[in-house]
Image (cartoon, rainbow, N blue to C red):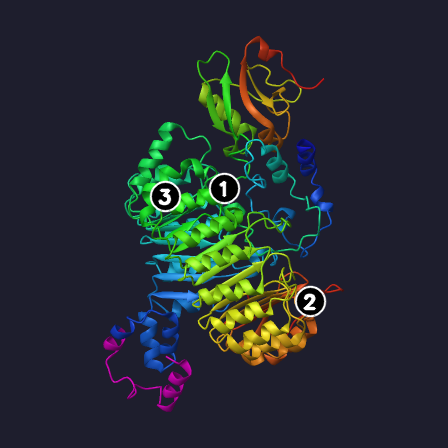
Amino acid sequence: MDPKRMRKLGELLDSSESTPLSPFPDEVLEAVLSLVKSHKDRSSVSLVCKDWYNAERYTRSHVFIGNCYSVSPDIVGWRFPRIRSVTLKGKPRFSDFNLVPENWGADVHHWLVVFSRVYPFLEELRLKRMTVTDESLELLANSFPNFKALSLLSCDGFSTNGLAAIASHCKNLTELDIQENGMEDKGGGWLSCFPEDFKSLEVLNFASLHSNRLLLRAPQLTELGTGNFQQELTMHQFADLQFAFSKCKNLQSLSGLWEALFLYLPAIYPACGSLTFLNLSCATLESDELAMLLSYCPNLRRLWVLDTVKDKGLEGVGSTCPLLEELRVFPEDPQDLDINHGVTESGLISVSRGCRKLIYVLYFCRKMTNAAVATVVQNCPDFTHFRLCIMNPGQPDYLTNEPFDEAFGAVVKTCSKLQRLSVSGLLTDLTFEYIGKYAKNLEILSVAFAGSSDWGMECVLGGCPKLRKLEIRDCPFGNVALLSGLEKYESMRSLWMSACNVTLNGCKLLATKMPRLNVEKGCSSFCSHIVKMNICWFHIRHRKPLKDVGFGCDSNN
Amino acid sequence: MESSVLYEGDLNLKATELRLGLPGTAEPEKQNPVTGRTNKRSSPGDDHKGSKGDSDAKNCDCQNPPAAKAQVVGWPPVRSFRKNSFLPKKTEAETGMFVKVSMDGAPYLRKIDLKIYKGYSELLKALENMFKLTIGVYSEREGYKGSEYAPTYEDKDGDWMLVGDVPWDMFITSCKRLRIMKGSEAKGLTCGA
């Protein structure tokens, strides 16, 4: 549903009373609307008229807040009284890479305090890039008796003590998904805080010790992410492990770190038949080890690996995983400068040849060519997510020494469904001309060490009709480019610019032209501009210390 | 050398260090996001146990920039939390956080995980519970005077040291195994001159 059309329709009619548009009793309207699941559709529905706005309010059970500063928890609680599930995202994505100062914010505690009051029946909470303390986890564990699912991704501030509280008090837990967080391991046996007989648990993703005991207790597991297996498993322990895995007939997703994975592979084979997602991004596997494991996983749709498997390992992927839809290859050692380590263009080509259903790729490499990328997208034209990271900033095509303009040109021209793109390597403004012109469905664009002038960014802001998030670092884009996007920013969720040519005056000018901007200051050289529903973050290099600058708006947290 | 590197960490030279990055941002450890795989497999085929000394140094010496070029903050874009989320402490499996504990006169050895203790007092309490004995209180001058038992450990150099002499962090990375000495041998152990 096009929200603009909906709104116009609503405006045509007098929206203050019940209208010809909604001649049904509220109960009918609510019954129908409760079937609408997509939050985008629900936003559109709420814009039609007052009756629909209210009906939508009362029937919404899941709220998605893409930016925790865009709205206060009290307003959420007031507007949506029947929420059972909340997704909250906090810091900008580049905080994952230490580009955001510590203690920037995005603390979930206040949200939980409000929710404990307004949503006593809350069942699910999914947090991404939020600060979560043990105190908050204890509050969570004690406030919601029906609580079922907790997911923490890339969060920080908590320790295993907080998880112990969850394990101890959440009797109805079906899902515990704790991944890639800045979690402090205080040891102790938080896992043993789970009840002896834990039939309800279906999803368990975490990184901690000794998961085999838990496996035995939770046979319904469909997702399991484990941590470190102790080096020296005795025969008895190995048999236990094998038995535990053999019980997991429903396992669809498996992830974890296995230091001596090769030795323990046979223990997990019994569980691999149903696997659709295998996350080996923490296991330093070689190509033959990977090949052996993959031979037991005929149903694999998503695979995450380390580049230790090399091109040869990826050839194996191409030949044994015809159903593969998603591949992520992470660098074992991102700081390693040797370009002969890790994977190259040839690995990616092999995968694209064998896995024609591939729609998602995240690929860290040290060598790439324009021709290879063009071949890859010809083989797999349905990419929705294409994230290529050539790890040496500004590196050209190693065969022709040219920029990668044509590579990414091929991507946007061929992959009409592309939603997310990350570019890298040596790139001129031409890349961005292509992107602006051809990437009609692009929503998220990440750019680093690229472009030649303001024109590049202007092309993107002037094209890409569906752009929601734009992240730029270390590019020669300045105030002219920044200010060219005023109209665009209205429909975007966030803009990040750091180490570019944007100056403080440019930001001030932006603030005056967009009066709903609120400014929040981090440290003296880091300004966050927060617009209702949007955030623009700027990291500006200052030569002088910044005095307290007020942009004339509230700075609310 | 590992121990001198460790010692640098104890002296907290971080405070005076020059580095790239945002003012007021994270510790150097975070700014050099080693993915946490301890780099022990940089040459495939190496026995990883053999290179654990290497990983030790890397784990402790977080201020060590690569030889060739200055690092770019936050690049490549690999989540810095990845290393935290799957390795509780990087040294755990490789450098013997699990150490054998023997007690003079006991028929078999035990094994404990040093990592789970926050300091000496917790460790000693655990040992006391495990072996049903009293070790008493450590003093720098007199060791465990008054106790029939003295907890000792073998360090990386092969020397037998009295538990408690060195800072805890240094202890747990250098301790290879523990031995609870009993009787006159124990009484003879004091610290320092």
Residue A539 lies, with reference to residue A152, above or below; the image says: below
**Label 2: chain letter:** A
* Residue A120 in magenta stretch: no
Q: Position of residue A300 (x, y in %)?
A: 37, 53
**Label 3: chain letter:** A
Task: Identify the disc placed on residue A548.
Answer: 2
Alpha-carbon distance for marks 2 and 3?
A: 47 Å
Q: Quadrant of residue A232?
A: top left
Kindly identify which residue carries mark 3. Answer: A168
Kindly identify which residue carries mark 1. Answer: A185
Alpha-carbon distance for marks 2 and 1?
A: 39 Å
Element on which disc 1 rests: loop
Q: In the rendered image, which quarter contains the C terminus of chain A?
A: bottom right
Q: Position of residue A371 (x, y in %)?
A: 55, 65
Label 1 or label 3, whichever comes before in sequence order: 3
From the viewer's perspective, is A261 left or right of B118?
left
Q: Residues within 10 Å of mark 3 (few under 14, many from 20)?
A: some
The amino acid marked with disc number 1 is: Asp
Element on which disc 3 rests: helix
Chain part drawn in magenta: A1-30
The amino acid marked with disc number 3 is: Ser
Residue B168 lies, with reference to residue A157, above or below; the image says: above
Label 2 or label 3, whichever comes before in sequence order: 3
Res A129 seen here: no
Q: Residues within 10 Å of mark 1 (few under 14, many from 20)?
A: many
Residue A160 lies, with reference to residue A501, above or below; the image says: above
Alpha-carbon distance for marks 1 and 3?
A: 17 Å
Element on which disc 2 rests: loop
Q: Position of residue A323 (x, y in %)?
A: 36, 57
Q: Residues within 10 Å of mark 2 (few under 14, many from 20)?
A: few
Q: In the rendered image, which quarter contains the N terminus of chain A?
A: bottom left
